[in-house]
């Protein structure tokens, strides 16, 4: 009986020692895990700071496949690669984020958005910007691009910055604008009474009213139905843009007026751009310029293709005497009292003295 009692005592002692060892082992492992967690969290935090992702929405009214859309896709590719993945450009074509004015206001409020904006639109903030889109101002696109490299333009950029608008890149060639109408147009007299869809800015409105048309501001995305329903009798834009909205399916007369050589800017809100690291802002500028050069080649190629497509679709293509149109729009340069006095002469002098 005593032997049995000793055996039970021995077994109980072994059990206690085993349990204590197990508890000690578990406590040590749990403690080690708890001590490791802060270190792991610190490492993750360091990685987040060092490789912070900056997501930027890229907004424009043009349709997928147009030169501007091809530019945006190229810009996304170049910027994300050059930044080592620190930049993420999210593309919103077809005015998905709203009309141009609405998105510019979003940018001014500090939202993470860069939007394509014409200088005719930017004249609502800095009036002198509008002269870059004045009708028949220059002979070719390169003259406009030269103007964006001058001290005069740097002053313009500073004035826009004071309005909360930061010009990110300036070299986007939008194209030469022509006129597509339901009725044949060869002279300014043919425009009399025709309702022509124009962008909602004073430069476009003044130009077409000077040429005798009834300028009718309408969102680009609504152009096709507006033509179908007779709300407008025609529209103007570079050929790839007119093709992109299928306007040629309704309107069958193309007048090669070339009334505007057109470049545009990509702008962001000053307050948002200032939150970006300087190296990323520089990457955005450089890759934006590179993408613009790429898109210019796309524009040239698409313009030739569109002319062929229009002809095949039964569009009558008319050469016009542009001198008659030029004479009518001279008054436009006197239509904006808010411009700096002598602005037109200053621009002409810059162009005459370019290297």
Image: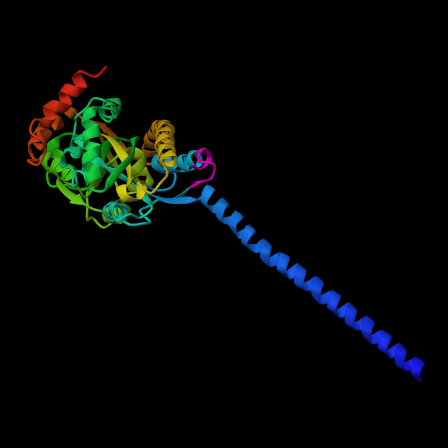
Is residue 51 at least partly visible in the picture?
Answer: no
Q: Residue at x 69, y 63 (%)?
A: 26
Q: Residue at x 89, y 78 (%)?
A: 6
Residue 137, position as x, y percentages in the image = 16, 26
Q: Quadrant of the C terminus?
A: top left
Q: Quadrant of residue 68?
A: top left
Asked whether 82 falls inside the magenta stretch, the response is: yes
Residue 235, position as x, y percentages in the image = 22, 39
Q: Quadrant of the N terminus?
A: bottom right
Q: Is 116 in front, or is 139?
A: 116
Identify whether 123 is placed above or below 36.
above
Q: Quadrant of residue 191?
A: top left
In the rendered picture of this protein, how many numbered marks are placed on residues? 0
Q: Residue at x 39, y 35 (%)?
A: 75
Q: Which residues are magenta?
A: 80-87
Query: Residue 88 vs residue 344: left or right?
Result: right
Asked whether 25 falls inside the magenta stretch, the response is: no
* Chosen colour scheme: rainbow
Q: Residue at x 16, y 41 (%)?
A: 124
Residue 184, position as x, y percentages in the image = 19, 34
Residue 55, position as x, y percentages in the image = 40, 45
Identify whether 256 is placed above or below 162.
above
Q: Is 43 in front, or is 231?
A: 43
Q: Quadrant of residue 22?
A: bottom right
Is residue 278 at least partly visible in the picture?
Answer: yes
Query: Residue 282 vs residue 26: left or right?
Result: left
């Amino acid at each position: 009986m005593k032997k049995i009692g000793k055996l039970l005592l021995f077994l109980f002692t072994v059990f206690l020692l085993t349990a204590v060892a197990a508890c000690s082992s578990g406590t040590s492992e749990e403690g080690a895990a708890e001590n490791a967690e802060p270190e792991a969290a610190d490492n993750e935090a360091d990685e987040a700071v060092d490789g912070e992702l900056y997501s930027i929405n890229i907004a424009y009214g043009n349709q997928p496949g147009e030169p501007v859309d091809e530019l945006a896709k190229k810009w996304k590719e170049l910027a994300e690669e050059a930044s080592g993945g620190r930049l993420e450009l999210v593309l919103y074509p077809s005015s998905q984020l709203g009309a141009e004015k609405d998105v510019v206001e979003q940018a001014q409020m500090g939202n993470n958005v860069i939007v394509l904006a014409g200088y005719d639109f930017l004249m609502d903030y800095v009036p002198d910007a509008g002269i870059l889109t004045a009708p028949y101002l220059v002979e070719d696109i390169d003259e406009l691009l030269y103007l964006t490299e001058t001290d005069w333009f740097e002053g313009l950029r500073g004035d826009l910055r004071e309005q909360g608008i930061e010009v990110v890149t300036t070299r986007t060639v939008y194209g030469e604008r022509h006129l597509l109408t339901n009725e044949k147009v060869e002279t300014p007299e043919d425009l009399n009474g025709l309702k022509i869809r124009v962008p909602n800015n004073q430069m476009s409105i003044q130009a077409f009213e000077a040429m005798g048309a009834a300028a009718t501001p309408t969102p680009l995305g609504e152009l096709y139905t507006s033509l179908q329903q007779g709300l407008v009798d025609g529209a103007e834009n570079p050929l790839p843009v007119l093709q992109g909205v299928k306007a040629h399916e309704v309107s069958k007369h193309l007048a090669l007026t070339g009334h505007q050589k057109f470049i545009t800017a990509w702008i962001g809100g000053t307050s948002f751009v200032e939150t970006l690291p300087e190296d990323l802002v520089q990457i955005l500028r450089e890759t934006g310029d590179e993408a613009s050069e790429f898109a210019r080649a796309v524009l040239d190629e698409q313009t030739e293709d569109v002319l062929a497509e229009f002809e095949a679709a039964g569009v009558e293509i008319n050469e016009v005497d542009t001198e008659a149109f030029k004479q009518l729009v001279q008054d436009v340069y006197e239509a904006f009292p808010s411009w700096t006095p002598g602005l037109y002469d200053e621009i002409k002098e810059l162009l005459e003295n370019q290297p």
